Image: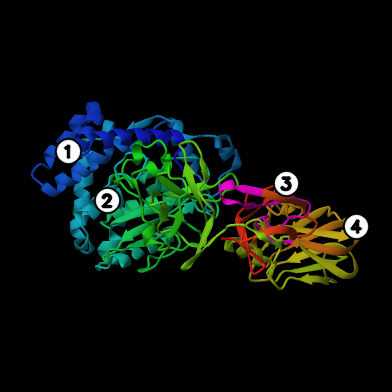
Amino acid sequence: MENKSFKQICTLSIILLFTVISCKEENHRLEYALDFAGDNRTELIKVLEHYSKDSLKSKAAHFLIENMPYYFSYTGHILDSIKAIKASVDENGKLPDDKVNPLKGFRYDNLPKTYDAHVITTDYLIENIDLAFEEWEKRPWNKYFTFDDFCELILPYRIDNEPLERWRSDYHKKFAFLLDSIYTGSDIIKASNVIGQYLRNEKFIFNRNLNLPHLGAQFLLKYRVGKCVDSCDYLIYILRSLGIPAAVDELPLSPDNLTGHTWNVVLDTTQRYIPFWFTEEDAVRHDKYEDGRKKGKVLRKCFGMQPETFEGILQDPKVPSFFKNFFKKDVSAEYFESSHEVPSEDSSEKYMYIGVFSPEGWLPIDMTKVVDKKATFRNIEPDIAYQPLYYNGLEYRPAGYPFVLKGDSSITFIPDRDNYESITVTRKCPLYLRVVKHMVKVVGAKIYSSESESFKQKQLLYHIVDTPKVSVNKVYLHTPVKCRYIRYTAPDERFLEIADLDFYYKKQLVNPVDISENNYEGQLPPEKLQECLDHNPLTWIVSKQKGSWITIDFGKDVYIDCLTYTPRNDDNFIRIGDVYEIGYNDGYEGWKYISRQKAQTDTLVFDSIPKNTLLHLRDLTRGKEEKVFYIQNGKQTFP
């Protein structure tokens, strides 16, 4: 998900400010939209006149036009050039560095905007409305939904800032057979899954390179490539063209990686929204979307303007811009039920916020009103560390002590300065499942030595039989081994995947002179193979065939008495030689960093740490990924 720049947010706020101030009632909003259209006002009036004798279609036209002043497309020939590069990805979603690198600083939000109200035509809107109604009236599940559901989830002619173009008839032409012949039943979830299964076979290629606005219906219909948000857009175009009410949900800021993510939801005849990301799995009734990422809060992209969360926040300079986008609706209640009450000790503060941790400071994801000296945050995800905050219009400051929700209870981290403890730490952020899935790929591998390149006579040095618990895994040999060659062999059922292999004799590194892969077709190039000898855990090799092996040549007979192997991982274990600093959160006083040390082993021990504290370990030598933790039963616990 791409965040809007400050400039975009300001533009949106100005539009909304005029809209809200000038348009207290529906007819005022319509008049504002018509005025905003300027010379194009006539095109919009023609639409209204066309439907003057059809009450429902007239209401639909009003809905689209009243919300139209917000919507625009970015323009510029450079967008076409960059999208052409995007379309040239290979089947693995890769683009050549020489195409990507020159565009790394490109920002599309500096390009001119063309507002829909200034250019949209009568024919375009009438076609969109008529086709949307045709599918709404045709599909049996739509009798369970309201007209408002239709307006928000089927009717919209666009999604966000993609090019303004015709798409309904093209998408319907390509995909209608799925519901007209493949599945002809009345279960909307089964219908959605038939579409999703077809699309998984068709495949969507993920590529996160290049900074672009929403790619647009015609581009996605032709190329099926893009980011998560583009895959969601693609499905929205398909579902809405076939009369299935759908939307896009997003987590604006994951506490795990401080990025966003999007997925689709389909409105079920049970009146519940069912999460649905076709690239991975089917929609399942009563399923709360879980993909391993923590969310904190969830928002839904809406075409129609939503009411203010709290009256007057649009005009309040002390409310951050993040909370002034009224085209996104907080739907966290569909995902989480937990609530938490925080006392407010500053009577001058009208609102309180909660933020999630980042090394640069807490980032707000929710706000609430202070009532009777209390702030109640509703529908927030458990097992996340939250910091209460105040905002003065320029910066945030702590509004209390951080807390974590645990089931029906909570932990508030108020340092206990009467009781101290010694703690042992092994990582600076959680060991995520995605990392474990890579680390396990060394299991079953065998490391042999030989004095002959043919390995007719070989000695097994080590067999990896368990998932590593650390980054660099050291193996001491019982007696020194004389050899010229080392062979690292993956088991028959696995691809060879390794970040680093190193060999030592009497604590001195023994350097190879060459490395090669067994002679499978499509083997890795020599320069890529060198990445498992570069002492960098963030570079790795992956074979193109299962059961592959690599052969390391020292150039002459050498002795080794120790070897290390490093599975592919995130390099967030304790790294020997790096300097680390530990700090604890002191609520209103912020972070206090109290001890610093250079790592001598793959664990760090810090003494005199106040109990019941939220802690932060930072690597002063390298890296960015750091998360807060606390000590539970003597072990690091990352919320």
Tag 1: amino acid: Asn
Which secondary structure, mark 4?
strand
Mark 1 and mark 2: Cα distance apart in space: 19 Å
Which secondary structure, mark 2?
helix
Q: Residue furthest top?
A: 39
Q: Which residues are magenta?
A: 566-592
Residue 570 picture location, percent across and down: 65, 56
The part of the image, by quadrant, that contains residue 120 is top left
Residue 478 picture location, percent across and down: 88, 72
Mark 4 or 3, nearer chain start: 4
Q: Which residue is mark 2?
A: 152
Mark 2 and mark 4: Cα distance apart in space: 72 Å
Tag 4: amino acid: Lys
Residue 574 drawn in magenta: yes
Q: Are marks 4 and 3 in contact (CB under 8 Å)?
A: no
Mark 4 or 3: in front is 3
Residue 289 drawn in magenta: no
Mark 1 or 4: in front is 1
Mark 1 and mark 4: Cα distance apart in space: 87 Å
Q: Which residue is mark 3?
A: 621
Mark 3 or 2, nearer chain start: 2
Residue at image coords 73%, 70%: 464
Q: Nearer the viewer, residue 179 or 23?
A: 23
Q: Which residue is mark 4?
A: 556
Q: Nearer the viewer, residue 470 or 238?
A: 470
> Visible in this render: residue 226?
no
Mark 4 and mark 3: Cα distance apart in space: 36 Å
Label 3 packing within 10 angstroms: few (<14), some (14-19), many (20+): few
> Visible in this render: residue 94?
yes
Residue 27, label in figure: 1
Mark 1 and mark 3: Cα distance apart in space: 61 Å
Examine the rendered structure and indicate whether residue 435 appears above or below residue 457.
Answer: above
